[in-house]
Image: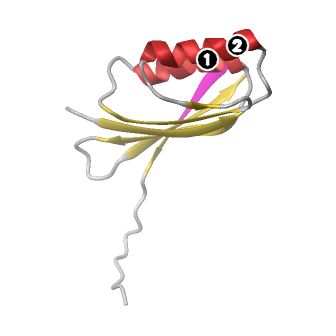
Amino acid sequence: MSEIRTYDGYFTFSILPREKADRLDDLFAEAGVEVDLALQSLEFSWMGREREQAIVKLFQAVAATVVEAEGELRCEIDDEKVDPHFEFFTIQGGRLQRQRGSLVREIERVPVE
C-alpha cells in the first residue's frame, strides 16, 4: 500500500540559546528538508512518501531541543482508503505527542442550492 503524507505545521517557543538554535539548523540540514526557522518560531511543510518515519523522527529531535512549544504539526495521510486520515503532533516536555484523527461524514446528503 502506497501512502502520501502531507505535513504542515507551525510552532512558537522561547528564544533558544545559540547552541540549540544551531542544533535545529543542523537537524533540518541533515534531514535535507526546508524549514522556515526564526528566533521564536518554526514553520514547516512537506509532502511525499515518508520512509521509516523520517519526519516524525526529525520532530522528535526538534521536541528534545526546544522542550516546550505552542502550535501543532498536522499530517494528512492519503492512502487507499475512501477518506484521508490524520495525525496531529504537539511538543510538550521535550517529547513529541501524537493524536490520531479521521474524517467523519454526515449520513445525510443535501442538494446544494
> What span is in magenta?
94-99
Three-letter amino acid code at the position of disc 2: Lys
Q: Quadrant of the C terminus?
A: bottom left
Q: Which residue: 34% across, 26% down?
A: 50
Check residue 24 in the rendering and tell me which mark sits there, or answer none.
1
Label 1 neighbour load within 10 Å: few <14, some 14-19, many 20+ = many
Residue 111 screen position, x and y as percent: 33, 85
Q: Which residue is mark 2?
A: 20
Check residue 34 in the rendering and tell me which mark sits there, or answer none.
none
Magenta span contains residue 97: yes
Q: Which residue: 58% across, 17% down?
A: 25
Q: Are marks 2 and 1 in contact (CB under 8 Å)?
A: yes
Residue 108 screen position, x and y as percent: 37, 75
Residue 11 screen position, x and y as percent: 65, 35
Residue 62 screen position, x and y as percent: 60, 19
Q: Quadrant of the N terminus?
A: top left
Our reading of the magenta stretch's main secondary structure is strand
Give 85 or 6, whichever is nearer the viewer. 6
